[in-house]
Structures are given as C-alpha cells and as structure tokens.
Image: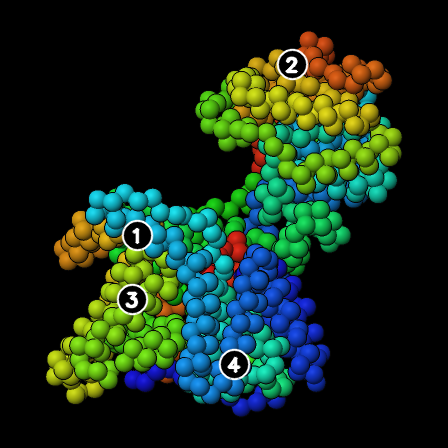
Amino acid sequence: MEDARDTAAPAPRRRPPWGFLGMLGIVMAIEWTLAGHDLDFTAPWHWDWRVIGKAATRPDRVKGREVLLFGDSLLKFGVMPRIIQQGSGKSTYNFALHTGQTSSSYFMLRRALRAGAKPSAIVLDLTPHMLMHAPEINKHLWPELLTAEESFDLARTMRSPDFFASIMLARHLPSYKERYDIRANLMAALQGRSVSRRHEIPMYRRNWKVNDGAQLMGDSPAPAIDVEQWTNSLYSRWFPHPVNVAYLDRFLALAASKQIPVYWLLPPILPSIQARTEATGFDAGYSAFVRDVHARFPGTIVVDARHAGFAPDLFMDGAHMNRRGALKLSAALAEVLRDPISTSESGRWVALDLDRVRGGEMPIEDVFQSGMALQAAGAATRR
Amino acid sequence: MLFNTFQFAYFFAILFPTYWALRRHYKAQNLLLLLAGYYFYACWEPKFLALLILSTVMDFACGLAVDRIEAPRKRKLFVILSMALNLGMLGYFKYVNFFAASMQVALAKAGLNVPLWHIEVVLPIGISFYTFQSMSYVIDVYRKDIKPTRNLLEFATFVSFFPHLVAGPIMRPTTLLPQIQAPRKFDLDQIYQGAYLIFWGLTKKVVVADNLSWYVNDLFGRWQTIDGGLALLAIYAFAFQIYCDFSGYTDAARGIAKCLGIELALNFNLPYFATSPQDFWGRWHISLSKWLQDYLYIPLGGSRGGTFNTYRNLMLTMIIGGLWHGAAWTFIIWGAYQGAILVGHRLAKPLLARVDPTEPIDRACWKAVRIIATFHMVCFGWLIFRSTGAAPDIHGVVAYTGVEQLRGMIDAVLYRPAIPASAYLLPVMVTVLPLLLVQVVQYLTKDLDIVLRTPWYVRSVFYTLCFYAFVLGGEFGGSQFIYFQF
C-alpha cells in the first residue's frame, strides 16, 4: 500500500462549513442538557459557592442583618447565626464558603454591600493554609461564584489572563466546568459504580437555609488523626500568597470605608495540632502576619480562639467543629459581639473565653437532621 | 508560550485578524510575523532572542557572500563560517557539558583524574531546530539550489516563523522562503483545514499524550518493580505518548501556518503503520529525516561507495541524528540502534523479498506481520530513548532497561497472559484505541484528510467526539511538549 496522502489543496470552498456548524448544534444541545442535570455531576461545595454567592446579592437576605460572617469552612461549620442572634441580639447571616479565600470573602462583602447590607459588624476568618494557597486551588469553584467583572478583577490581580479565560469558558460551557465530576462519573459507571452525590445536595441546601448560610455538622467523637500528617500537609511553612494578602487588604479597606468594624476570628484547631504548629514556628509566623495587618487597620478586632480551651471532642477533624463545638464557639463569639467595641490597643485583641459562655443550647438542625427531615417530607408526600 | 495554553489563544486571537487585515501588504504581514515570532520566542527567555537574531543575521550575510563570491575556496569558507557559528552555538549550549563529562569518565578509566569544566548553561528552546534550518539556507545557496534573498526582513521571517520555530517541522528554504516572499491569499477553505489541524493536533496532545504521560511516568518511575505485562504496557503507552505529543504539536503548527496562508511540510505520516525501519523513517519526523539525508548522508557518500561505506554512512547519520535529540549516551545508543536496524533491514531485504507472498490475503497478513514487527522494533528503541536520566555510559542504559526486566517481560508475553492491572490497561486502551481507529481508516483509505472528505453529518459527529474528548478528557495544565527539550 502506498503512503497516505496529505492533500494540501482540495477544491476551493464555496459552501458554509456544515461539519463545523453541525458540531456546534450538537454541542449546544448537549450543553443545554448538561446544564439541566447539574445535580448529577456537581459536588455539594459547588452548590455552596453558587447558592451562598447568590444569597449575597439578594436584598431580602442581607438587609436588616447586623452581623455578616465571611471566610472559609471553619466559620461555615463553626459559627451558627441563630446562636449569635440569641447571644448578642443581632441578626446574622453566614456567607462563609467551603475552601473560601480572602478574594471570595471580598467579593461576597462587596455584593452584600451593593445589595443594601448595612451591618454593624463583620466577622472574618482566614484559615492560615487557605491564605497560603493561590486562588487556582479553587479553580473548579470560581465559575460558580464570580461574575465576568469579578473574574476580570481577580485575574488582573493574579496577572493571569489564562485564569480569566478559564473562568469564562467554564461559565459558558457546563461540560468544561464539571469535567472532573463528569469524568469521575463515567469512570465509575464503566466499573458499575456511582459516585454521584445528587442525593446529598438537597440535604445541605436545606441545612444552609435553616441555618442562615451556616452548615451544622452532626455530633462526633474526638477525631483520631495523624497530627504529624496534618501539620505537614497544612501547616508546614507560613508564607501567605500575595493575591490573598491583596484581597485581605481590600476587604478590610472596604469595611473601613463603610466604618464597619471587622472581627477577625482566629478559630481554634485541634489542641495537639495547635501545639505542633507552635513548636514548628508556623504559628509565630502567622501571628506576626495577623499583628501586622491588625496594626494597619485600626477598625479590626482580633478574636483569638486558638487557646480558648476547645477540647478534642468538640472537633470532627483536625480543624472543623462538630455540632457541640460549633454551638460553643458561636455562643462564645456572641458574647464578644454583644460587648461594646473597645478602642484601646489591648481591647482590639480579644482572647475568646469559653468560661463566659451562656446559652448556645437552643435546638438547631444539623445536616443529618436535615436529611431526615427531607426523607420524612418525601414519605409524607408519597403517602 | 505553548500552543495548548490560553496565553497562546490570546496571542493568536490578536495576530490572526491583524495579519489578514494587512493582506494587501504582504511586506507588512512579514513584519508582523517577524515581531510575532520574536515575541513568541522571547516568552520563554528574552535573552536567548539574541541567539536567534545572531544566527539570522550571520546566515543572511553568509548567504549573500556565498552567492556573490566566485572563488570556490572563499565560498566554502563562508559555508564553514555559517556552520561553525550554528554548530558552535548548538555545541556550547547543548553538548559542551556532555562531552566534558564523558571525557572525564574516559580519562578516569585510564587512570587520569582530571577535573574538567562544567558550565551552568540553560538550553535555549528550539535551538536544534532553527540552527539546522538557518544553516541549510547557506548550504542551499552554496549548492545553488536557491537564490539568496536580499531582503533581511524576509529571511528573518523565514527563520523566526513562530508555528514551527521551537519544535519544527524543519522547513527547507526552497519550500518556505518562496511562500514568505509572495503575497498570501485569504482562503476560507485553507483556514478551515488549518482550524481542523489545530483542533486535531491539540486533541492528540492534551487528550492522548498528556493523559498517557501520567501512566508512563508512574510505570517508568517504578520500572524495577513492575511485572512484564505492565512493562510492555508502559512501552506501548510511551510509544503513543511521544507520537501524539510530537505529531500533535506539528499538526497544530501546520494548522496555524495554514491559517496564515503558509504551508508547512508534513512531518508524520502514520509512522506506526510502517512496514520496515526504512519505511518508519520515511514517516516519522520526516523533516529531520530528509534534512539528515540531504545534508549528512548524501554528503558522506550515501550509497555510492559500496556496501560497507553505505552501512557506515547510515550508522553515522543515525548516530548523529540520535545525538541531535539530546546530549546523552542514551540518545547515541538509540541512534546506533536505529542505524543497526536499518542496516539489518537492508541485509535482510533479499531474504524478505523471497518470502514475500503473492496471494492477496497472504500479502495482507504478511504486511500486518511486518507492521507489528516494525512497531515492536521501534518500541524497543523507545525503551532506550526513554532512559534519558541514566548515567552517561552504556551501563546506565543496560541497568535502566534492566536485563532481568526484559527477561521478565519476554517471560510474561510468552508464558503468561500479559494482563496488567485494569487500573492501567483500561485507561490506556480508552485513550489509545479511538486514535488507532481513526488512523486505521486513514491508512486504509490512504488519506490523512479523510475526515474532511466525509459527509457533513459524519464530520459533525467526529468533531463533536473530538470536542468532548478535548473538554472532558483533556489535561489543561499547559504541559510542555517532549520535543521542546531537543
């Protein structure tokens, strides 16, 4: 057989490229179908960014709220708005996101303010390791949250046109945005399994709704974790990413421009990991960073919960609170928010005190109870 | 700047309309291409742009000098000057540490412990490609195959034409320069074909090569502990990874050039369907094979000086071709291996001719046997080629390929069914089989562009499948192309 030909010049084209146009038609049909099957492919935290991100733009969610919470999963799992309201008398909403970063917090705050929020206080938490990661770590989640303008803002700060293109592509092409989940589903299907988390999403959505954006986990025994591994993977060397620092400054400057005090919560982590981070010098580096930012923004009150005495059985893993821990932390924070703001230097750095905690005993629905409530509602409907 | 990045998409999105907006002024188009080429190159390391400019200016001047001077000795002098400059640059940046280290090892074996220099030097990207191309211009002018251009802009555009600047195909002045010197015609059909080539090339790269790279790196990373079946799978996977990586790049390069109204040479023609080592080198990295044939093998005497000289020339050409790929003994051994199988094939030709069947079915079976045999000979070469990190002597290669491992592999193939863990087999098959299917159709129809000649609905489905393979299966890390290191 002769070599395959590479015909460089077939007859000149005078017709439209039907093959290409046909592909566009098929792709549009598939994308439209995919967009209608979000639940099958996306993980719960995609919904978190999408649902809570939208909540920040809704006047009915932000108006009248006196305390707004921003940050990451430590705050999302750890601080319950209803407990804050009970303890401080201030209506609260939790806009913290799973793996949230300073940039996501900044955009959420800006959205809330644009939607008419006039909070008297803002609570912010920034897990050290999320401060160290570049925004790319959340590349699958950003398309759920950012508008084109916000994407451009973040990409410009990152000096990454690629990031902007990737977010824009993901916003308009569901298959691109959800490709890892679709791939995992396909591979699992080939092996006769299912990895879809469709059934969990309504449960989480209900929980965020009843808890004003927060997510209350169930009760759990003290976690058995490898302290060395946790420390090495999350708290090995303190080095904040410049993009996160830039957005932290912008967040605090925005709050200062509206004269809203920011309570910067340094949340507790498992005591054994806390001790390890202090031994390695990581904690000292992080503390120095917090002190530096604190000095630059006089409207910031640091609420240090690192040595508040949270026992290991209040955690569900090395950093996140379980149900009892979340209720305790919320009640302790409510006490701080209730007190008048001190203008003295020492008054701007508050050590959280669990001994002062009152209340925090009100019935609150955790995710498992949300799941059961949904099951019961489903059963009632079927009947 | 890599073709598989958004950065390049931005670059081309600006360049393409600007370029065609200037279609009535091809000299302005050339200037734009030159600036684009220099920007494209400077994105890696701006300081190495000086090398590209130096090579361009020197070879332009040498070309003019060779053309103007009549005296043969003086003409030759300028060719030598051009070669000294280009090979000198290549030698300094690519080979100096290798030769120094090898000499040190040789001296140490002779009992002389002489500390030789080691220069901290970074290999400028694409230097092996543009030096060869630039040098061949002066040689062509010397041979009077081409009239030299008197326009530096045209020559600089020819050397720095960005689609093929860093990883080929190595274009001959006789084919590319005339295209630079003439106005380009805006042809939608050509642009459509170009877009198809870019799409197909990037699909090969990000879907096949980049996905296989994970399995290849993993398996080669623990080569000494895997069983024979997995070793065989690792080699097959690497064969397709390197093919799709390199041919994907050149397909995309050809497509980009087509969109700019310029034709680049075909560099890969279904190489794994080759029926002999000689056939393989007519299908794999064709532009390099042709370059080595025209500027090395034939000047060495080619097949004119008797059997021994022919084989010697073949071996020398392939060893130098191997060395071109990189400064390591593994590449020299790989080149020697390729030379040896070429010589072996020539020696076996009379025997093969005798067993060549005449019946159509027998002929088809015989051809299939030859394709499979050639593919496995090539695969063994890839095993040597992949052992780049080995020590700079032959023991390194032997240790790396591992005699025990090879024995285990043969054992596995002969006595045990080579069924590797499904964690590897399934993804490798899923990645490679669709590509093979397309290639079988291309091979049977003898038409690389068969897709473009199918009915529109077939094309639509094919493009859709490629699109989703690209979007869902692609690795978008902007990973480097393997041949960039050469």
Q: Which residue is mark 2?
A: A308
Instruction: Tell me how far mark 3 sits from mark 1, CA to CA.
Output: 16 Å
* Res B372 seen here: no
Q: Which circle marks residue B319 in the picture? A: 3
**Residue at (40%, 68%) from the top-left corner?**
B435
Q: Nearer the viewer, mark 4 or mark 1?
A: 4
Instruction: Tell me how far mark 2 sits from mark 1, CA to CA.
Output: 64 Å
Instruction: Tell me how far mark 4 sits from mark 3, CA to CA.
Output: 32 Å
**Residue at (35%, 52%) from the top-left corner?**
B100
Q: Which residue is mark 1?
A: B102
Q: Which residue is mark 4?
A: B65
What kind of residue is marked 1? Ser
Q: Position of residue A152 (x, y in %)?
A: 72, 52
**Earlier sequence position, callout 4 versus callout 1:** 4
What kind of residue is marked 4? Ala
Q: Position of residue A229 (x, y in %)?
A: 46, 27
* Res A242 seen here: yes
Instruction: Tell me how far mark 2 sits from mark 4, CA to CA.
Output: 84 Å
* Location of residue B409 with respect to A233 vertically, above or below: below
**Earlier sequence position, callout 3 versus callout 1:** 1
Instruction: Tell me how far mark 3 sits from mark 2, CA to CA.
Output: 71 Å
Instruction: Tell me how far mark 4 sits from mark 1, CA to CA.
Output: 38 Å
**Residue at (35%, 47%) from the top-left corner?**
B116
